[in-house]
Amino acid sequence: MERPIAVIAFGGNAILDKGDDGTFETQLDKAKAACREMLSIMHRGYDVCLVHGNGPQVGNLLIQFEKARDIIPVPPLDVAVASSQGLLGHMLEVSMRSVLAEDNMERNVACVLTQVVVDQDDPSFKNPTKPIGPFYTKCDAECLRTKMGWTLVEDAGRGYRRVVCSPKPRRILELDSIRTLLNNHHVVIACGGGGIPVNYTTNSVMGTTGVIDKDRASALLAYNLGAELYMIITGVDKVCINFGKPDQKAIDVMTVSEAKKYLAEGQFPPGSMGPKIQSAIEYVEKGGKEAIITSQENITNAMIRPNCCTRIVRD
């Protein structure tokens, strides 16, 4: 029996946030909490695909690579993204299996290492802006610029930090595998960290340096799967305009035209809500019914009360 598909995207901060002790046990507990919130979606008859961020985790991996630089060669960035997919995929898979067992729900769980094709001519390759990894002194930054060819910029007086490109996702190589698993009622974990960025030709597939935004990758996945439910999880129940100001206003429903207008006005910054709004727009414009943006704790309410979250809909 065919079931509707739900694609749920949430950030790596849901599992490892500022102030956490960073241990595997703490991250596993938070992964289980995230998985428990997904049960309400499955109880409503959906087959679920989870897309996770990886910012804190890949940042930690890069610090580990840097500390071991004199002992072990530093791998390329696409390998770090792949490593984070394995790390978080393992956490989420064992967490989801445990949560399903607690709920007496019989479903298989599968984590899919996911490669995402990007355009070699994407303009972001000429203008890297995505900060990753540890902070460096000015002297170390100059050495890394020379030795590694990295782009490093000063970050709010805290030191220098590497910046990389964030190309637009074009094609998900494992799409058919993901669809097959969902059609066989597996809970699927895919496109972790936005996917491993690759250049694809008729003769080869090769990893490339960059970090794909996980929300934009999840929108591409949701559209290609024909998902009936697309939900982006963030730190607030609703999207707000004039955020943090006296006239802050929460939004229940936003049309695509309104969302584009607010984006143009700078209501949604590139480093926070902006990519989520852009991803919601892309999904709806390609034929999706609506995109939901809300908090992890509000997932169940969002499924039954349309006015307790933000919904981006067609004009």
Image (cartoon, rainbow, N blue to C red):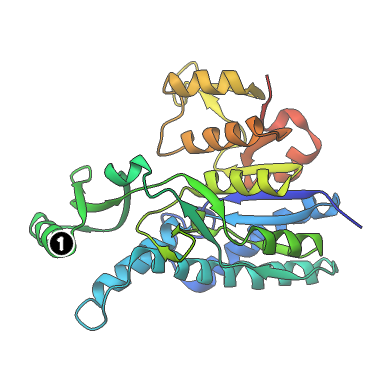
> Considering only vertical position in the picture, is 65 above or below 249?
below
Q: Quadrant of residue 150?
A: bottom left
Residue 12 visible in image: no
Residue at (56%, 37%) from the top-left corner? 279
Q: How many marks?
A: 1
Q: Quadrant of residue 240?
A: top right
Residue at (34%, 58%) from the top-left corner? 209
Q: Is residue 125 left or right of residue 306?
A: left
Q: Residue furthest front?
A: 202
Residue 249: x, y in percent? 56, 20
Q: Residue furthest left?
A: 139
The C terminus: image quadrant: top right
Relative depth, front residue between 274 and 29: 274
Relative depth, front residue between 266 and 166: 166
Q: Quadrant of residue 230?
A: top right
Residue 302: x, y in percent? 73, 38
Residue at (46%, 59%) from the top-left corner? 201
Residue 136: x, y in percent? 18, 58
Residue type, numbered disc 1: Leu
Judged from the image, the secondary structure of the residue bearing numbered disc 1 is helix
Q: Residue furthest right?
A: 1
Q: Is residue 294 left or right of residue 245?
A: right
> Considering only vertical position in the picture, is 309 above or below 112?
above
Q: Residue furthest bottom?
A: 71
Residue at (50%, 20%) from the top-left corner? 262
Residue 77 visible in image: yes
The residue at which mark 1 appears reads as: 144
Residue 33: x, y in percent? 65, 59
> Considering only vertical position in the picture, is 145 above or below 308?
below
The N terminus: image quadrant: bottom right
Relative depth, front residue between 80 and 121: 121
Structural crowding at the residue carrying mark 1, measured as other residues with C-alpha within 10 Å and reported as few (<14), some (14–19) or many (≥20):
some
